[in-house]
Each structure stands twice: as C-alpha cells, then as structure tokens.
Image (tube, helix red, strand yellow):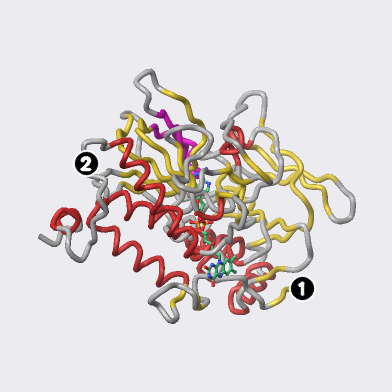
Amino acid sequence: MPMTGKTKRASWTNWFADHPYHPAQTVLETDALVIGAGPIGLWTVFELGLQGLTCEVVDTLDEAGGQCVALYADKPIYDIPGLPVVSGSDLTQSLLQQIKPFHAGFHFGHQVSALSRLEDGRWHVQAHGVHTGKAQSFAARSIFIAAGVGAFVPKSPKLDGVEALQGQHVFFQYPDSAPLTAGKVCVLGGEQAAVSCVLQLIREHPALTVTLIHRRNVLKAQEADLSRLSALQSSGRVEFVIGQVSALLTSDAAPHALRAVQVDTSEGNLIHIDAHTLVIQQGLSPKLGPLADWGLAMARKQLSVDLETFSTSQSGIYAMGDIVQYPGKRKLIVSGFHEATQAAFAAAAVLRPEQSQVLQYTTSSALLQKRLGLT
Ligand code: FAD
C-alpha cells in the first residue's frame, strides 16, 4: 500500500486517552458554567474567581487549551501582552496555573447539548460524554459561552445506528472497554491516530484480526509506524481495505451487537467485513452544534453580544472569545481576555449585588489576594 511519511501531529493519538467519567447521579450546582476550556474559557474562570464566583468548565476535548492546543500546540505566539513569545501549550499551562486557586471543576470529554430555564431562574445544562454518551447535568446561576469555533468532535461518517452501538461496539478512541481478546476489529481512518490504533490493537491482543479501512490508497503517519503496518500486512495480521463504510450490520437476534461493516470499495463493489468492533479514527472537526439552537441572537453563525457586559440576547448568558461577533471584533486571544473580564464584572453585579462594585486591584486588595490564596 502506498504511504506517505507525513503526520499532522503525533500527539493526536493521545487526544482520546482515557479520562475520568463523571456520573450523572447528581446535578452539579454552580455560580457559573463555562462552556469551553480554550484560552478565553480559562481566563473567564480567573476573572469569575476574582469576583468570588464558583465555576464548572465543560469541554469536548480531553484537555484544556482549545485551538491553542488542538491546532497549534508547539507554534510560537508573539502577541500575548507581557510574554514576548509563548507556545500554545505553554500559554495553556500558564493559564491553568493561574486559575488553580479557584478550584474550578473540569469536565473534559463532555459536550454541552441542552439548555433550559429552571423555575428558580437558574439554568439547567445537560452535557454528554463524547466517548461514553453518558449524561452530566448542571444547575448554574449564569452561563459563559467561550466555545470558540465550536466543539472539537470526532469526525464520523453518517451511519445509521452509530449511537446505539457506541461504547459497546463502536468507539471514537482506543477501545479499552471492549472485550477484545479475540475476533475481528475494523479501524476506520488514514492518519496517525488510525495507524497507531491498529498497531496498539495488534500489540495488546495478539489473537485479534484487524482490518484498516480508508477511502484512499495513501496513509499519512510516521515512517516507523507505516513500516510496522506494512510488515503486519505482509504477515496477514492486518488487512487494508480501500473504500468507505456505508452501513453497520447487526443481526435480528442481536440488534445491539455489531456483526459486520459494509464497505463501498474503490472498485465500486459492496463488501461486508465481519467485525464485532469498529474504531473510528478520522480526526476532529469543530462543530457549533446545539449552541446554535438555543434561540440566542446570532450574526454570521456567531453570537451577538452587548459590548459593555458581553451578555447575549438572553439574560444570565454571556459570551466571549471567537464565538462572538460585534462591529470591529478581532479573533485574537487578547480581545477575548478583555471580553471575559467585562462579562465577569457584569455577572458579579447581578449574582453578588451586595458586593462593592468599586474597582479593586490585585496588587493592593486584601479581598482579591485572599481569593487568590495569597493571604
Ligand atoms: P477556542 O480556542 O476555539 O476554544 C473553544 C473550546 O470550546 C474548544 O476546546 C471546544 O472544544 C470547546 N467547545 C465548543 N463548543 C462546546 C460545547 N458545546 N461543549 C463543550 N465544549 C465546547 N490568536 C492570537 O491572539 N495570536 C496568535 O498568534 C494566534 N495564532 C493562531 C494560529 C492558528 C493556526 C489559529 C487557528 C489561531 C490562532 N489564533 C491566534 C487565534 C486564537 O487561537 C483564538 O482566538 C483563540 O483560541 C480563541 O479562544 P476561545 O477560547 O474563544 O476558543
């Protein structure tokens, strides 16, 4: 099989590493729910913390940093005030360190899906695990949407029945939870994540038969991994099929168990490949998703905001960073930092009306220094 030695980013394989699952037995109560753990979501946590407000943060990714980590982790950024040069991942680490005193709860690997108003005026927010499909609910006094260009979610072909099989027979990360001692597994994808997944499956489960399915006759991964894959293909341990998965097949007797995947091959044939597990590793793409259906005023697929408070058209819901649009908006980190700061002050005026609105400085305020854990 022809393969190129290019890889987008070796650490993509780690993105869907295991993460702790927060079960939904309880509704988490919080002053503020922050949607998005990109640089602006993290700075929002800081500003809310200075205002004495508690935070829970939800992100579809398995780590903080948003675009800075997902798209350009090792590239230098030169326009963060006070930092002549910083990489996307170092900026994220510094922000995480800076918000530590506020003990925000993080819910990685979760996508915010539904929103409704509770009778007491708070917001009920539903999130679900992108790997597990399981739910987590929040009751929040305010919501801060720092969702950037959208939720980074795994790319998936449109296949009937994926949801019903997900977590048991269909996976978007290495299938640790599947019973894999023997049998047939299909891996879908043509880049590093898919190749690494095949190699790991063979390494950890010698009795497995693995089929790699990709729509093109070219794989993009590290040279060493491609050589290993070629050797496994020659020895018959791995099969490579060029085509598109067009259906998931189950049997009438066991409608919730995968039996085979149907592939439209590059030669125009329809074939069935026996498999009890399908691992989809086709990378990530940003999707605005359900936020677009919340009835908030939008312009060009971005949220419209009040320029003083960064409130959306719905009271109690604020927005900041790349997700917002207003005349003169610049999609820069420094602009998002300002927007988050304004929104936190505005929310504090509503949620903590008893608190003095007189501006305090971190250099001299005993209250702010106490909240920062310095006194
Ligand atoms: P993001 O970084 O996009 O983070 C949003 C987060 O929200 C994501 O992690 C996403 O998964 C999550 N999310 C979205 N929807 C949901 C949902 N429903 N549920 C759960 N989670 C959700 N800016 C600069 O100032 N200087 C630069 O030099 C610079 N260089 C750049 C280089 C590149 C290649 C790119 C692509 C951008 C660059 N930018 C730069 C722009 C900068 O990265 C963005 O302005 C910044 O990341 C916006 O931050 P954010 O927190 O608003 O959104």
- Residue plotted at (78% across, 62% down): 216
Residue sitting at the far bottom: 84
| Residue receiving disc 1 | 2
Q: Quadrant of residue 208?
A: bottom right
Q: What type is the residue that disc 1 sits on?
A: Pro
> Marks 1 and 2, how far apart in space?
66 Å
Question: Residue 132's spot in the image, x, y percent?
Answer: 47, 40
Where disc 2 sits, the SS reads loop
- Residue plotted at (57% across, 61% down): 331
Q: Specify the segment rendered in magenta.
A: 123-137
- Callout 1 crowding tier (Cα within 10 Å): few <14, some 14–19, many ≥20: few
- Residue plotted at (59% across, 34% down): 163
Q: Who is closer to the viewer here, 207 or 375?
A: 375
Question: Residue 59's spot in the image, x, y percent?
Answer: 45, 48
Where disc 1 sits, the SS reads loop
- Vertical comparison of 264 with 42: above or below: above
Where, quadrant-wise, is the C terminus in this rendering? Answer: bottom left
Residue 179 visible to an observer of this rendering? no
Q: What type is the residue that disc 2 sits on?
A: Gln
Does residue 271 show up magenta in the picture?
no
User: Predominant secondary structure in magenta?
Assistant: strand
Question: Residue 269's spot in the image, x, y percent?
Answer: 87, 48
Where, quadrant-wise, is the N terminus in this rendering? Answer: bottom right
Q: How many marks?
A: 2
Q: In the picture provided, is 364 more to the left or to the right than 23?
A: left
| Mark linked to residue 355 | 2
